Structures are given as structure tokens and as C-alpha cells.
Amino acid sequence: MQSIISSRGQTAVPAKIRRRFHLESHSKLEWVINGDIITVIPIPKDPIKTFRGSLKGKYTEKEFLKDRQQDRDRERRQT
């Protein structure tokens, strides 16, 4: 999709993109430059709420405790 930059440096976000990413008036966008490429990333109004539960079922408490114990063991060996 394309948009045009106005003489004031403004551009419109196409409706299809606004709907897909739930962008509304006053939504924030992050512009990232990587070499010659510009990436636009929508910033959620509540980032914590957006990512809450996204790791559910992927990393259990038991796995966390096991990894933490391995970290402690590694730290003890290094000292």
C-alpha cells in the first residue's frame, strides 16, 4: 500500500491498515530507520495489557525455576 506525503510532511494511514492494527485518532507510531529502510511500528496504548498472556503455556513455572537454578550454578562456578 502507498500513501503520499503532504507539503507539511503529513501522510495518511490507509483504512485497511488502521482497521487491522486497531489504530485510532492519537495512536502512536514508532519510525525505525535501518539503513535505507524505514519501518513503522504501531505502539499499543497499554503495552502491558497487549503482551499479557502472550507466553502462556510456553514457559512454565517449573521450567523457570530449573533455568534459574542453572543460572545460580553457573554463577557459583565462575567465582
Image (cartoon, rainbow, N blue to C red):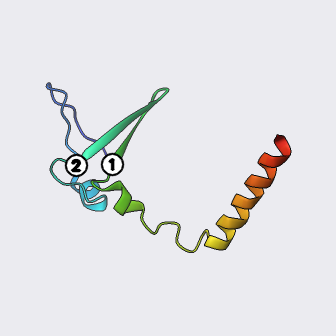
Q: Is residue 55 left or right of residue 25?
A: right
Q: Is residue 60 visible?
A: no
Circle number at residue 42: 1
Q: Nearer the viewer, residue 31 or 48?
A: 48
Q: Is residue 35 above or below residue 18?
A: above
Q: Is residue 29 left or right of residue 77?
A: left
Q: Nearer the viewer, residue 16 or 53?
A: 53
Other residues around mark 2 within 10 Å, as few (<14) / some (14–19) / many (≥20): few
Classify residue 21 by image quadrant: bottom left
Indicate the secondary structure of the residue bearing disc 2. Answer: loop
Q: Is residue 54 above or below residue 7?
A: below
Q: Inspect the image, locate mark 2, and give the three-letter code of the amino acid beneath it.
A: Ser
Disc 2, disc 1: CB below 8 Å?
A: yes
Q: Nearer the viewer, residue 77 or 23?
A: 77
Picture residue at 68% right of the left edge, 66% below the top: 65
Q: Nearer the viewer, residue 6 or 64?
A: 64
Q: Residue furthest right?
A: 77
Picture residue at 31% right of the left edge, 53% below the top: 44
The image position of residue 52, as x and y in percent, is: 42, 65
The image position of residue 1, as x and y in percent, is: 32, 47
* Image quarter (top left, top right, bottom left or bottom right) of the C terminus: top right
Q: Is residue 51 visible?
A: yes
Picture residue at 46% right of the left edge, 27% below the top: 36
Classify residue 64 by image quadrant: bottom right
Q: Is residue 8 left or right of residue 56?
A: left
Circle number at residue 27: 2
Q: CA distance from mark 2 to mark 1?
A: 8 Å
Q: Inspect the image, locate mark 1, and give the three-letter code of the amino acid beneath it.
A: Pro
Tag 1 or tag 2, which sits nearer the N-term?
2
